[in-house]
Image (cartoon, grey):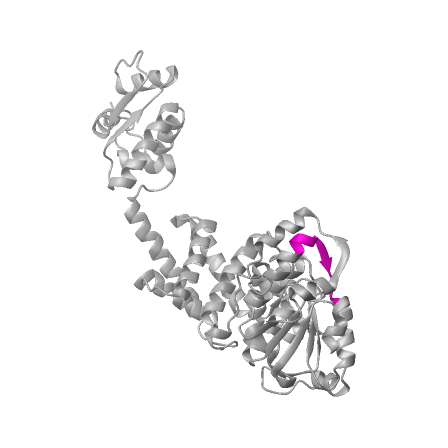
């Protein structure tokens, strides 16, 4: 016999009853999954490894003996029949699922459709608010992907951001508030990129401006991952923009992967590191991105003096030229100083000073764009030869190894022994023009240094 209490009160009693019976957690979860698959209350739920308490609860609900059974199959029809004859019979099984899980059951396909509709509503509203701003381009890209299935390099980056936001915010209708919040964040991040105003600013300043937290984009922070995805989209979107060079002049970012992210940020006007990021040059002429001659660099050229140039400064250059369209690139600062003193008014030089920094790679990009031939000389040890090989692979122009032959190594050789661990590094060197020196180094196991070759360099 059914109780005829008010329905809202009956639903509360129903929920209390269901939560008080452990077996309903498993049973209703099973029917919930069936509903997701078929869009209706149907199918059969298998209950395995029943406890004694669960068997007793099933016996009470179905009025049937389940003694000794470890597994029971419950069809939707049997459940509906037993439920309709219970005190809560006026509540449908579909409503039971809604009461228990606090949300309406929906077929997966329907849930997906509603989720995508929600995204479209959010993007439509965001598009209106972002109209006339750079972020409107990202919103349009994402709308095209969701509605038309557009496929391109740009759309691939857009999909990455979409997947990231889905994972971060959740994939249900209840995620709407968080999705709106994150879409708004993406819009702010895109519109705040210093590139749009032709500026360059430090990452901490950019983070504080966008989020209020100067450390929001630090490595390991959640928003740092989002920013990197946005900058990938920006780079694809603007690949024919500020660095519109022929493909043959485009560098291979896989050579120095650790610097790729720094460069990605810098393209959008964000400096991750500038204090220690510089390169030293001599005898060059530079032009700003707006086409105007860089008077500071010209001053050093006229005075025949070397100058340390920061990453922030090089990032604003548009073109570089060298004497005779050649540049002599050396690893050692002492050797660089000697060459500058000997070559006043004659040649152009650059000092790498150890491992390449982003400032040096940006300058190499500009030099390649101007058709400059590079003559490179480095130290004769495993690390130095690896740097030489990587620079040759990176540079998109003529790159000549300068005094790096077997005979040069023999003249530069010191008494410093190279450990077996470091000798093993030579296995990574495949550049044919370096192999004669590599083979001799394997035999001698001695390092060679540029200082001993200064006489050759200045002849």
Instruction: Out of 183 and 298, give the one closest to the viewer.
Output: 298
The relative height of residue 218 versus residue 366 in the rendered view (above or below) is above
Q: Does the segment drawn in magenta span residue 305?
A: no
Q: Residue at x 55, y 59 (%)?
A: 430
Q: Is residue 374 left or right of residue 351?
A: left
Q: Residue lying at the far top in this picture: please name it.
A: 68
Q: Is residue 368 left or right of residue 169?
A: right
Q: Number of numbered discs present? A: 0
Q: Position of residue 301 (x, y in %)?
A: 72, 85
Q: Position of residue 163 (x, y in %)?
A: 42, 54
Magenta region, residue range: 441-450
Q: Where is the C terminus found, in terms of image quarters?
A: bottom right
Instruction: Out of 224 and 411, give the one closest to the viewer.
Output: 411
Q: Where is the N terminus found, in terms of image quarters?
A: top left
Q: Residue at x 46, y 54 (%)?
A: 165
Q: Is residue 315 visible?
A: no
Q: Residue at x 28, y 44 (%)?
A: 107
Q: Does the segment drawn in magenta span residue 443?
A: yes
Q: Position of residue 96 (x, y in %)?
A: 31, 34
Instruction: Out of 407 and 269, give the one closest to the viewer.
Output: 407
Instruction: Out of 230 and 182, give the one closest to the viewer.
Output: 230
Q: Residue at x 61, y 57 (%)?
A: 216
Task: Find residue 395 and report its image quarter.
Answer: bottom right
Q: Is residue 348 left or right of residue 235?
A: right
Task: Find residue 102 and report its image quarter.
Answer: top left
Q: Position of residue 4 (x, y in %)?
A: 28, 29
Q: Is residue 183 visible?
A: yes
């Amino acid at each position: 016999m059914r109780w005829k209490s008010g329905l809202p009160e009956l639903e509360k009693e129903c929920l209390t009853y269901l939560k008080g019976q452990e077996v309903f957690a498993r049973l209703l979860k099973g029917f919930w999954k069936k509903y997701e698959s078929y869009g209706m209350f149907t199918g059969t739920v298998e209950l395995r490894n029943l406890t004694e308490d669960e068997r007793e609860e099933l016996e009470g609900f179905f009025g049937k003996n389940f003694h000794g059974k470890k597994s029971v199959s419950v069809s939707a029809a049997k459940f509906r029949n037993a439920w309709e004859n219970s005190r809560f019979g006026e509540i449908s099984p579909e409503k039971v699922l809604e009461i228990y899980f606090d949300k309406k059951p929906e077929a997966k396909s329907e849930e997906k459709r509603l989720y995508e509709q929600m995204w479209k509503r959010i993007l439509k509203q965001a598009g209106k608010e972002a109209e006339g701003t750079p972020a409107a381009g990202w919103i349009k890209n994402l709308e095209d992907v969701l509605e038309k299935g557009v496929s391109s390099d740009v759309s691939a980056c857009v999909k990455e951001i979409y997947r990231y936001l889905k994972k971060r915010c959740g994939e249900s209708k209840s995620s709407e508030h968080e999705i709106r919040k994150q879409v708004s964040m993406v819009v702010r991040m895109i519109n705040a990129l210093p590139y749009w105003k032709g500026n360059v600013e430090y990452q901490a300043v950019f983070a504080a401006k966008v989020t209020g937290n100067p450390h929001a984009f630090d490595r390991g922070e959640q928003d740092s991952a989002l920013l990197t995805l946005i900058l990938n989209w920006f780079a694809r979107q603007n690949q024919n923009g500020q660095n519109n060079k022929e493909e043959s002049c485009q560098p291979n970012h896989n050579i120095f992967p650790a610097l790729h992210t720094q460069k990605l940020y810098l393209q959008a006007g964000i400096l991750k590191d500038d204090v220690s990021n510089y390169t030293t040059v001599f005898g060059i002429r530079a032009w700003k991105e707006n086409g105007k001659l860089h008077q500071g660099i010209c001053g050093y050229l006229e005075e025949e003096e070397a100058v340390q140039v920061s990453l922030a400064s090089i990032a604003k250059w548009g073109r570089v030229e060298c004497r005779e369209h050649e540049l002599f690139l050396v690893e050692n600062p002492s050797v660089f100083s000697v060459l500058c003193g000997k070559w006043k008014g004659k040649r152009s030089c650059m000092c790498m000073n150890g491992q390449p920094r982003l400032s040096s790679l940006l300058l190499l990009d500009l030099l390649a764009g101007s058709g400059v031939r590079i003559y490179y000389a480095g130290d004769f040890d495993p690390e130095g030869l690896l740097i030489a090989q990587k620079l040759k692979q990176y540079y998109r122009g003529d790159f000549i190894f300068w005094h790096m032959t077997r005979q040069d190594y023999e003249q530069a050789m010191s008494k410093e022994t190279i450990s077996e661990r470091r000798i093993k590094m030579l296995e990574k060197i495949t550049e044919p023009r370096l192999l004669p020196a590599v083979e001799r180094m394997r035999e001698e196991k001695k390092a060679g240094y540029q200082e001993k070759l200064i006489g050759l360099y200045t002849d």
